[in-house]
Image (cartoon, rainbow, N blue to C red):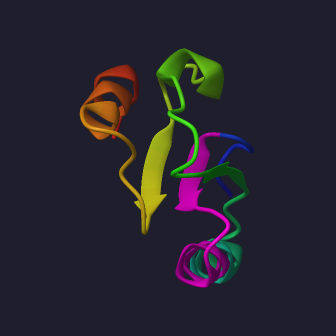
């Protein structure tokens, strides 16, 4: 089983496709015993990477959302994969 919080799923919120993609991720991780931390991201607010409280060893999945320009690259530079 993966350590709780090491897997992070960021998803587009409040749209249905983002929510359902997060649900699909949860169901897939549940089969492997992985406990993920879910972070809703909205187009209405530019989220700052430092506001995500990443430790640097997380595996991050972005579902249906990559954020404002440069956001995904900034996240990738902060985490393991």
Give above or below for 58 relative to 65: above
> Is residue 55 found left or right of 31 in the rendered image?
left
Viewer-proximal residue among 62 and 44: 44
- Per the image, is 12 magenta? yes
Residue at 54%, 78% (x, y): give it: 21
Residue 70 in the image, given as x and y percentages of width and height:
25, 31
Residue at 65%, 75% (x, y): give it: 19
Which quadrant of the structure image shows residue 69? top left
Q: Read off the magenta span.
A: 6-23
Residue 79 in the image, given as x and y percentages of width and height:
40, 28
Residue 53 appears in the picture as rendered: no
Residue 66 appears in the picture as rendered: yes
Residue at 70%, 41% (x, y): give it: 5
> Is residue 31 found left or right of 48 in the rendered image?
right
Give above or below for 76 relative to 54: below
Q: Looking at the rendering, in which quadrant would you find the N terminus?
A: bottom right
Residue 13 in the image, given as x and y percentages of width and height:
63, 63
Instruction: Report how many numbered discs are placed on residues in the image.
Output: 0
Give above or below for 6 relative to 27: above
Q: Looking at the rendering, in which quadrant would you find the C terminus?
A: top left
- Per the image, is 49 magenta? no
Viewer-proximal residue among 46 and 9: 46
Viewer-proximal residue among 31 and 7: 7
Residue 65 in the image, given as x and y percentages of width and height:
42, 59
């Amino acid at each position: 089983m993966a350590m709780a919080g090491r897997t992070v799923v960021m998803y587009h919120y409040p749209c249905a496709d983002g929510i359902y993609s997060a649900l699909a991720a949860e169901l897939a991780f549940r089969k492997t015993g992985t406990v993920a931390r879910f972070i809703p991201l909205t187009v209405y607010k530019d989220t700052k990477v430092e506001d995500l409280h990443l430790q640097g060893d997380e595996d991050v999945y972005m579902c249906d959302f990559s954020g404002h320009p440069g956001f995904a690259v900034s996240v990738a530079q902060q985490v393991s994969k």
